[in-house]
Image: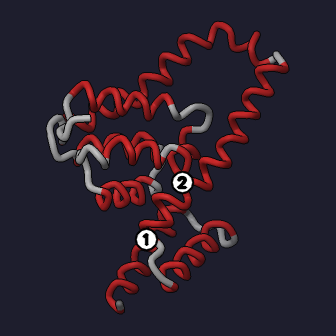
Amino acid sequence: MMAGAGLVEVLAASTRLGLTSFGRPIAHLRYGVLPLLQAEVVPPGWVTNEEFIAGYGAAQAVPGPLFTFAAYLGAVMHQPPNGWMGASLTLVAVFLPSFLLVVGVLPFWELLRGRPGFQVALRGVNAAVVGLLLAALYDPVWTSAIRGHADFGLALVAFGLLMFWRLAPWLVVLIAAAGGALIARTA
């Protein structure tokens, strides 16, 4: 892939992201498609790994993280199309596969959803997501965020706040950011 981001390359990458968002796009972005997306935008130099991780973290605090993150990446790309144009293009391209799938499948949905083979296939897709979740938790999330005992402790606290105390994700992001700033200051 070329070093700069051309219009065709950006549209193709965003459309591939939309295609991988089968089923549950929010869960997939949070974990499953993260390594795939990172491989699309970081190696060609469209964004740095730090920009990628920062945008990923921020996107988790708002509704619709897949679409928010796609627009963010389009806006912060180092080469044109970027800014508002890049954000608009990546946003449209990430939605396009879903719209086309709905238009193509909707007439046959009632017929398909009653078939046992189709139900088994959907369960298989959902089971495969578990492996993607674990892989994405390790790389890039774990490898870029957990660098020592303090980072690990902060991650455990954030997990506990989400899972056991059921705090709002945006609040946990703010708490984790404050904790990360404190850790960085003391290091």
Residue 178 drawn above or below residue 46:
below
Helix, strand or loop for disc 1? helix
Q: Is residue 40 left or right of residue 78?
A: right
Residue that extends furthest to the bottom in the rendered view of this protein: 186
Residue that extends furthest to the front in the rendered view of this protein: 1
Residue that extends furthest to the top in the rendered view of this protein: 107
Q: Residue at x 54, y 54 (%)?
A: 136
Q: Earlier in the sequence, mark 2 or mark 1?
A: 2
Residue 112, given in percent of the width and then of the height, sits at: 74, 14
Asked where in the image residue 153 lies, by quadrant, the reply is bottom right
Residue 98, given in percent of the width and then of the height, sits at: 50, 24
Mark 1 is on which residue type?
Leu
Asked where in the image residue 187 lies, by quadrant, the reply is bottom left
Tag count: 2
- The circle drawn on residue 63 is none
Residue 137 drawn above or below residue 90:
below
Q: Residue at x 40, y 55 (%)?
A: 56
Density class for disc 2 (Cα within 10 Å; few <14, some 14-19, many ≥20) is many
- The circle drawn on residue 136 is 2
Q: Residue at x 38, y 86 (%)?
A: 182
- The circle drawn on residue 174 is 1
Can residue 72 be seen from the camera position used here? no
Q: Mark 2 to mark 1: distance in Å?
A: 22 Å
Asked where in the image residue 88 lies, by quadrant, the reply is top left
Mark 2 is on which residue type?
Ala
Density class for disc 1 (Cα within 10 Å; few <14, some 14-19, many ≥20) is few
Helix, strand or loop for disc 2? helix
Residue 54, given in percent of the width and then of the height, sits at: 35, 60
Residue 47 drawn above or below residue 86:
below
Q: Is residue 69 left or right of residue 163?
A: left
